[in-house]
Image: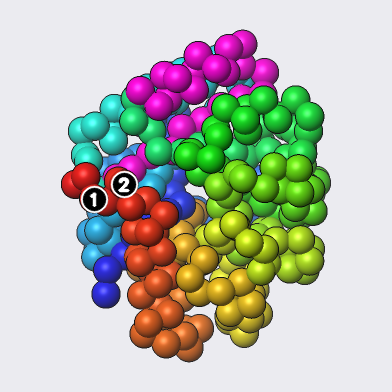
Amino acid sequence: MEFFDVHAHIFPPHVAERVIAQLEGYYGFKWEGTGVYEDLIASMDAAGVRRCNIFSCATKPEQVETANTYLASLQEKYPDRIVCFGTMHPEYHDPAAEFARLRALGLKGLKIHPDFQRFHIDDPKMIRIYELAGDDLPLLFHVGDPYQDYSAPKRLGKLLDMMPHLKVIAAHLGGYRAWEEGKRHLVGREGVWLDSSSTIGYLSAEEAKNIILSHGCDKVLWGSDYPARRHQGAIEDIRKLGLSQEQQEMIFYRNAEKLFSSIVSNT
């Protein structure tokens, strides 16, 4: 079995410990990894993971360029192991110029975290950013939060009603701790991929399996959410669902290869 992780975070070494401490405080549990590149690769190698999509989120406008440059440098240095999504902030001063640079750097999509970036998914001020992403750069949204509704599944559904051409990955099976709302607004929706990161353990195996089958195994992507979880545990989360070998292959790597076909074919 091959494995292509579509959802992992990485942080510059000088801030990784502080960022993880903040995330542990917000989400209320101990994270398993250190969030630096060397530990990511060690986690991948221990579980036999071939490739990983990583990102980092700019929580301030002035972090955008630095984060994108850092991610691009990792992708260039380790092209056989990682691909990277860039970041954008709603208050960044010249998104058109940064999107042009993002594409020139070879970043493959955009990670959006409305809760930490403090905007609603369907906020009108974000429309220009979504337009700049077009239909070629996938947008991976963090969806769902128990404390606020910036990333509510219904808001992503509303956005897709307005902009159905967007290529969207809805993280956490369509809504972290908001799975019932995710079922109403995202599960089964055409043109939407779901990723499996940080779901099983909060959802029962039966509930997670029902969401996956309702959406379609051909539109579900495996994600570890490293450093929240190490890769071996995230693999076992999917294996215990009782899916067929073919269904597991789709989720673990075939769907990601399809979504990132131009990336895979060039390596």
Give the SS element for disc 1.
helix
Say whether marks 2 and 1 touch (CB < 8 Å). yes
Q: Where does label 2 land, which residue?
A: 262
The residue at 79%/29% (across/down) is 124
The answer to which image quadrant residue 14 occupies is: top left
Q: Is residue 61 left or right of residue 234?
A: right
Which residue is most to the top? 93
Q: Crowding at label 2, few (<14), some or many (≥20) Cα neighbours within 10 Å?
A: few
The residue at 79%/53% (across/down) is 154
Q: Is residue 176 left or right of residue 255?
A: right
Q: Crowding at label 1, few (<14), some or many (≥20) Cα neighbours within 10 Å?
A: few
Circle on res. 161: none
Q: CA distance from mark 2 to mark 1?
A: 5 Å
Q: Is residue 61 left or right of residue 136?
A: right
Q: Residue 113: x, y in percent?
A: 62, 40
User: Which of the pair 148/93 is nearer the observer?
Assistant: 93
In the rendered image, residue 103 lying in the magenta stretch gets the answer: yes
Q: Does residue 135 sit above or below 208 in this rendering?
A: above
Q: Tell me, what colour scheme is on the image?
A: rainbow
Q: Residue 149: x, y in percent?
A: 80, 46
Circle on res. 265: 1
Q: Residue 56: x, y in percent?
A: 48, 35
Q: Does residue 171 sit above or below 90 in this rendering?
A: below
Q: Quarter holding the N terminus? A: bottom left
Is residue 94 in view from this perspective?
yes
Q: Amino acid at mark 2?
A: Ser
User: Which of the pair 53/63 is nearer the observer?
Assistant: 53
The residue at 76%/61% (across/down) is 185
Magenta residues span: 82-104
The residue at 38%/59% (across/down) is 258
Q: Amino acid at mark 1?
A: Ser
